[in-house]
Image (cartoon, grey):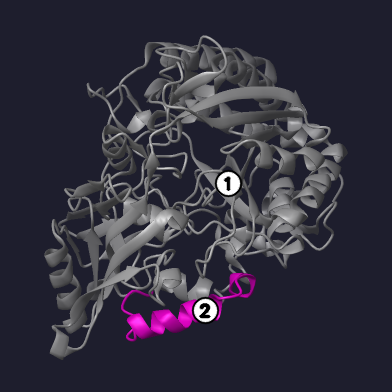
Amino acid sequence: MASLLLPVHGLVLLLVIMTCLLGVPGMPPQPPAGCNQTGCTVSNAYGVWGDRKECWVSSVVYPTTEEEILSAVANANKNKQKVKVVSGYAHTIPKLVCPASPPENSVLISTAKYNSSIQVDKDKLIVTADSGVGLRELINRVEEAGLSLVAAPYWEGASLGGVISTGSHGSSWWGKGGAVHDHVVGLSLVVPAGASEGYAKVIRINGQDPLFNVARVSLGLLGVISKVSLSLEPGFKRSITYLFKSDGSLEEEFMDHAKKHEFGDITWYPSQNQTVYRNDDRVPLNSSGDGTNDFLGFQSTLILVSSAVRSAEKSLESAKNVRGKCTLAASGLAYKKVIANGLKNNLIFTGYPVVGRQGKMQTSGSCLYSPVTSTASSCAWDPRFKGLRFYETTAIFPASRFGDFIKDVKKLRAIKPENFCGVDNYNGLLIRFIKASGAYIGQSEDSVVVDFNYYRADEPSTPRLNQDVWEEVEQMAFFKYGAKPHWAKNRNLAFSGVQNKYPNFSKFLQAKKQLDPGSMFSSEWSDEILLGKAAAKGDGCALEGQCICLEDRHCKPDKQYFCKPGLVYKEARVCRYVPSSIA
């Protein structure tokens, strides 16, 4: 089997290279919400929720003004309906936008058409925009005014309201930090009200308001964000150089890197014993260079390519072919090095440093946009095609504990290094930095964020190759080292005990009760995660991260996956493949 797959890998890599060099235009993503004869549903951009259950709602409304949002909330409140909000993008992995059951008593508010107002105040260095405005449009308007937005997530396929609600971030311990919500200077919320106030009202919140630290990261649980104001700075450029080196001193060097480089990050490829240090710094606007950050993973991909990659990965999984995954990991890293992972000095990468305007360097997502629509390509994970399907785990560590986590991961790797190749097929472990925040469910101390993607099967009953390794890393992060989960990512188990990880969590819940006394914006997901209402553990629930296994039936014993202790973090409980000859 392995000998048959290796030529396929080479073909896939060749197709990927062709896609990148040709700059193939792509097909826009499908809208997250839609209605037909049987009702309305809402999904995320990946086409599948963590529990794989569809989310049904009775109706979807598309307000275009703040007054229409006010009317929608008032009408829902008057009729005692549950409400959730979704943007035109919906890249949130957890089920934040799904109202509580039954669907017949719920309404979904989409901000996809609420995106017309962007006002830049050059004198006060503030931009105020509708919550449905896309991040790319916002950044472009700010740059046109000769200014720059300092913080943004790396992926630009998000709305302004969505970015704020979920605590999205870039990477920086400098200034106000890398989290976008720490650059908010004011926002407006549409919240439920009594009959005497028309069942809904708009409240304006600024930095002096007691609700400011509640509303900056709110997960859509307080009401509908209608307007957001962000602080700006005079326009500047950034200079980026990727430095490839051994990972031998990573646990000793990560903190110095964050302190030396304003926007620096680190990508760790454990199976390759490699780290990639991103030396990323602010430079004056008159610096030479017109570069662009067109991150490889966010470029439009030929559907033929994404389907072939998925097919090859499925074959490797079913054959338990670790060596094949390592071949992919090594060739993928080599290619990223050649093309600087998507950095372009102009049309292509010609050498370091790559210098460009802040707005072109801080975020990317070219698969979302195209001057010419093509049905031959799309974002690689587009659910309409048989492309990539993956999990994403994002853990936010206290900076003081992150070095010990790295040491534990290295101990786990030492047992069998090739078991880490699966994650290196994607983006390795991306390490970023977030400054301490006053937001109640933001980060209370300077923190280190680790993101990693890994294979997800088409069917919930199908175990993964080296499943136990990534379950152990996941549990090690969240339970041994007390990492917090990113609100817009992660499998459900990452949120276990989250209530105890935020010093001001009870204050957040008190404010929620004040603003939404009827729990109009609550849902089954928020009740389970935020209030700790545990869900029942069903057969196979650990395979999808819906639970931590306690019994073999939570794994897949008929396929020889049993619930076992971790190898380094002994308190972990993971689903491990045990061949019948050993069992």
Q: Amino acid at mark 2?
A: Leu
Residue denoted by label 2? 531
Query: Vertically, is 16 above or below 281?
Result: above
Sequence order check: which comes first, mark 2 or mark 1?
A: 1
Q: Of 502 and 56, which appears nearest the observer?
A: 502
Q: Amino acid at mark 1?
A: Trp
- The residue shown at (42%, 67%) is 218
Residue 361: image x %, image y %? 45, 30
* Mark whose residue sits in front, 2 or 1: 1
Q: Percent from the top left, x then y, of residue 452? A: 61, 42
Q: Which residues are magenta?
A: 498-522
Q: Is residue 500 magenta?
A: yes
Nearest to the observer: residue 466 or residue 512: 512
Are circles 2 and 1 on residues that touch, CB within 8 Å?
no
Residue 326 at x, y = what percent?
70, 25
Looking at the rendered structure, the secondary structure element under dot 2 is loop
Image check: 51 left or right of 270?
left
Whether residue 457 is visible here, answered yes or no, is no
- Residue identifier under label 1: 174
Q: Is residue 427 above or below residue 496?
A: above
Q: What residue is shown at x 58% (from left), y 40% (from top)? A: 455
Magenta span contains residue 443: no
